[in-house]
Amino acid sequence: MRIYNYLYYKTYLLAQRSKNFDDIPVLGGMLFVIPCFMFNIFTFFPKTLKPVHFFPAAFTVFLGFIALSFIFRWYDLFNLSASVLLLYAMAILIDAVIVTKSIYIAYLSVIASFIQLVAYGIGFMTDFFKRVLFKVQ
């Protein structure tokens, strides 16, 4: 996580120095393209897929579970799940503050980590269903 925070911080400094914030949406687009590329590699080299590649998909399903527990008014389950999510966000925030010495960058790293995990999770699940379950090439 520290490496990711450091890279995010360096990207932010580069954008700030160049005064070019127009390319920031490109980063978001890359977050959706990279998981598809990763899964396409899996179809050609099946041994490259490790169990750790399923964690972003589990995180995405967990977020959906939190939303469903709130919608169906399972408040005890919602409180427990939201507490776990808040603990994860606080861990990222504290680590980012220690590394970058900036609250603002730490706040952005929490947002970026959520975006990255959800993007990887959606891309992985989409390609998994298409290529493995439905055998679409």
Image: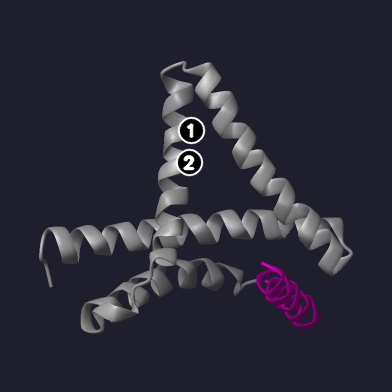
Please identify the residue farthest to the right as the structure is shown.
101
The reply to whether the C-beta atoms of the residues labelled 2 and 1 are less than 8 Å apart is yes
Disc 2 designates what residue?
Answer: 63
What range is drawn magenta here? 1-21
- In this rendering, is residue 32 above or below 104? below
Residue at 62% from the left image edge and 72% from the top image edge: 22
Q: Quadrant of residue 126?
A: bottom left
Q: Helix or strand or loop: what does disc 2 sit on?
A: helix
Characterize the local packing of mark 1: few (<14), some (14-19) or many (20 or more) Cα atoms within 10 angstroms: many
Q: Which residue lies furthest to the left in this view?
A: 135
Whether residue 70 sits left or right of residue 14 in the image: it is left
On residue 34, the disc is none
Task: Determine which residue is flagged by label 1.
Answer: 66
Query: Dot 2, how many residues are within 10 Å of its Cα: few (below 14), some (14-19), or many (20+)?
Result: some
> Horizontally, is 29 left or right of 6 in the view?
left
Whether residue 20 appears in magenta in the rendering, the answer is yes
How far apart are the alpha carbons under marks 2 and 1? 5 Å
User: What quarter of the picture does the C terminus occupy?
Assistant: bottom left
Please check the rendered image and state whether residue 75 is part of the magenta-colored stretch, yes or no: no
